[in-house]
Image: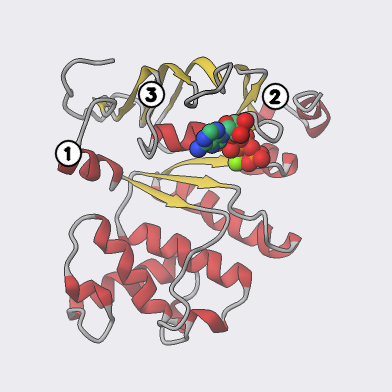
């Protein structure tokens, strides 16, 4: 583990994973070991692998939501492996996390849910409810909604939205924390095919036009090939694939599921 946290640098990759290994308490073998890869700023990286291969565990370790046994994680050259308390929260706020389930607060408006994303930086009570927020905070939240094409639904309650719209609001909420990276764990798994494509396009546009680094887990091999610049695959506890998406097709990726 890196002994002292280092400062961020623009030249360093957005994410660097170095010699990472993870074993859960009581498990006979590690989920995976000796995982190393770097993600340049603005890259779209897909992570694939069978059920239980450890994709979610890898994303969670990269966010330090759980700790790896060995290895280091760097965000833009800053080692985050040993950070604790406020320094760890600050590092985590650089990453927006989008889950399979959007976890929006149902009875509140879209705008209020997006404002909640700002609490990654400070637990300001003004951000709890849109009526308490400042004009500037509301404008920022609206700008985030605009980026996912939903500014017109700002006043709507989130329990009145479709699955695809809800997931876009979850992306806007992540954008509200002004992240450098977005990690998404099967973000379109519960959406219909068209809504899934639409949401993947939103992520992809954010990476390509706003320079956000986008790391996503998917079982949709077409999405891995189409919406990623690069695909890595976990198999039998190892990093078994690391290729540019342009060099891959769905048929080749199916070999990861044997
Ligand atoms: N909190 C935990 N405690 C113990 N074992 C765990 C825990 N979380 C995950 N595991 C185990 O780690 C392994 C990897 O799980 P993980 O959820 O990362 O897989 P995955 O690749 O995301 O699978 P899926 O495609 O089904 O989402 C599995 O064997 C799982 O049972
Ligand atoms: Mg998973």
- Kindly identify which residue carries mark 1: 87
**Please, what secondary structure does the residue beneath circle 1 have?**
helix
Q: Nearer the viewer, mark 1 or mark 2?
A: 1
Crowdedness of circle 2 by 10 Å Cα count: few (<14), some, many (20+)? few
The picture places residue 26, in percent across and down from the top left corner, at 51, 23
**Separation (CA) of disc 2 from disc 3:** 22 Å
Crowdedness of circle 1 by 10 Å Cα count: few (<14), some, many (20+)? few
Quadrant containing the N terminus in the rendered view: top left
Q: Is residue 122 left or right of residue 223?
A: left
Q: Nearer the viewer, residue 147 or 25?
A: 25
Query: Which of the two labelled residues, at mark 3 and mark 1, occupies the earlier sequence position?
Result: 3
Crowdedness of circle 3 by 10 Å Cα count: few (<14), some, many (20+)? many
Residue 82 vertical placement versus 42 (above, below): above
Q: Is residue 218 left or right of residue 71?
A: right
The picture places residue 99, in percent across and down from the top left corner, at 52, 53
Res 42 → quadrant? top left
Question: At x 28% / y 70%, what residue is drawn?
Answer: 140
Quadrant containing the C terminus in the rendered view: top right
**Separation (CA) of disc 3 from disc 1:** 18 Å
Query: Disc 1, disc 2: CB below 8 Å?
Result: no
Mark yes or no: residue 230 visible. no
Q: Which mark is residue 16?
A: 3
Query: Which of the two labelled residues, at mark 1 and mark 2, occupies the earlier sequence position?
Result: 1
Question: At x 60% / y 53%, what residue is drawn?
Answer: 200
The picture places residue 255, in percent across and down from the top left corner, at 80, 23
- Kindly identify which residue carries mark 2: 247
**Separation (CA) of disc 1 from disc 2:** 39 Å
In which of the image's four quarters is ligand 1 placed? Answer: top right
**Please, what secondary structure does the residue beneath circle 3 have?**
strand
Q: Is the C-beta of the residue carrying label 1 under 8 Å from the nearest atom of ligand 1?
A: no
The picture places residue 62, in percent across and down from the top left corner, at 40, 32
């Amino acid at each position: 583990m890196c002994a002292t946290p280092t400062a961020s640098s623009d030249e360093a990759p957005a994410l660097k994973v170095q010699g990472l290994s993870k074993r859960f308490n009581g498990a006979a073998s590690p989920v995976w070991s000796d995982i190393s890869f770097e993600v340049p700023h603005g890259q779209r990286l897909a992570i694939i692998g069978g059920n239980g291969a450890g994709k979610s565990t890898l994303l969670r370790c990269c966010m330090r939501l759980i700790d790896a046994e060995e290895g280091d994680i760097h965000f833009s050259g800053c080692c985050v492996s040993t950070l604790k308390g406020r320094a760890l929260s600050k590092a985590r706020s650089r990453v927006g996390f989008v889950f399979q389930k959007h976890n929006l607060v149902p009875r509140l408006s879209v705008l209020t849910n997006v404002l909640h994303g700002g609490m990654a930086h400070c637990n300001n009570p003004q951000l709890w409810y849109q009526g308490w927020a400042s004009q500037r905070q509301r404008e920022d939240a609206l700008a985030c909604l605009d980026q996912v094409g939903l500014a017109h639904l700002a006043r709507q309650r989130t329990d009145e939205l479709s699955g695809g719209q809800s997931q876009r609001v979850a992306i806007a909420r992540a954008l509200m924390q002004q992240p450098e990276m977005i990690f998404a764990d099967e973000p379109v798994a519960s959406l219909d095919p068209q809504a899934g494509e639409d949401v993947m396009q939103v992520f992809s546009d954010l990476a390509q036009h706003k320079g956000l680094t986008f790391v996503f887990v998917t079982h949709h091999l077409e999405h891995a090939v189409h919406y990623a610049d690069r695909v890595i695959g976990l198999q039998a506890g190892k990093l078994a694939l690391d290729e540019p998406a342009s060099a891959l097709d769905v048929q080749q990726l199916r070999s990861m599921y044997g």
